[in-house]
Image (cartoon, rainbow, N blue to C red):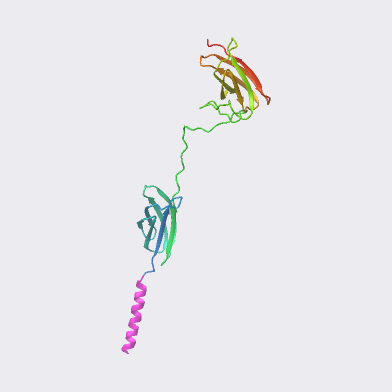
Amino acid sequence: MSRSISIFSLALVFMLFSRAVPADDGSISIRLTDDKGRSLNGTVQVTGPAKKSCTTASGRCTLSSLKPGKYTVTVTLTDKSKLANKTITVSGGKTATLAFQAVPAPVKKDEGTKSKEEPTGAKGATSSKGKLPDMGTGKKLCVSGRVTDSQGRSINGSVLIIKDGVTIGTAATQNGRFSIYDLGKGKYEFTFQAADKSKATKTSDYADKALTLTLIAQPAK
């Protein structure tokens, strides 16, 4: 009889103990890296059925003793930047793994840098804003010319190539002669300017055949 009571007592204690023990807790293993796979460090916080945090070492940390359920994971790196939150479900007696990868912020373009524009008919040229392209060299010769003063003497300076009111390039003279390359079809104004302010202008249509121009510079008034 006493033996039966002892067995019953043990069974009762076992049942009571089993009910008192909660379901096994789970955990989350965290890994932080940059976009090249290098470890990053920071603070990891979880909210959900429980609230906990950990600090990574060599990019890793583990949050243990978490009640089963869905958690929101927040990461703040050591430089105070935050990564996008993630959610994960924790199961009893299991370790869930979660990896975060930091993506570098986009590099801002220099506001002072403007993209090159290609005016109609001017292959590879830019507008008159900023430094003018040198059209004295290129692949296809379009204009050959000479600049002289009123006495027929060669003079040096720069020839500006203008289309539709926009200066698209320049070509320097050597011994009074200049060449211009890679023009598109259209009407152009060629304006010569010398250091002494003397000037000459001529307008010509370019189709596909090379032009020969003579500019006679007049002294500045």
**Above or below: residue 158 compared with residue 8:** above
Residue at screen point 44% across, 54% down: 100
Residue at screen point 42% across, 56% down: 31
Query: Looking at the image, which is closer to me, 212 or 41?
Result: 212
The residue positioned farthest toward the front in the image shown: 175
The residue positioned farthest toward the left in the image shown: 2
Query: Looking at the image, which is closer to me, 106 or 178?
Result: 178
- From the top left corner, tell me how far across and down residue 119 is, in percent: 59, 29
Q: Is residue 130 left or right of residue 2?
A: right
Residue 184 painted magenta: no
Query: Looking at the image, which is closer to me, 136 or 86?
Result: 136
- From the top left corner, tell me how far across and down residue 54 is, in percent: 35, 57
- From the top left corner, tell me how far across and down residue 58 is, in percent: 38, 55
Disc tally is: 0
Residue 19 painted magenta: yes
Query: Looking at the image, which is closer to me, 161 or 107?
Result: 161
The image quadrant that residue 95 belongs to is bottom left
- From the top left corner, tell me how far across and down residue 85 is, in percent: 43, 52
The image quadrant that residue 9 belongs to is bottom left
Residue at screen point 61% across, 24% down: 180
The residue positioned farthest toward the bottom in the image shown: 1
Q: The N terminus is located in which quarter? A: bottom left
Residue at screen point 60% across, 20% down: 189
State the predominant SS element of the stretch in magenta. Answer: helix
Q: Is residue 112 left or right of residue 174?
A: left
Q: Which residues are magenta?
A: 1-21
**Above or below: residue 78 compared with residue 206:** below
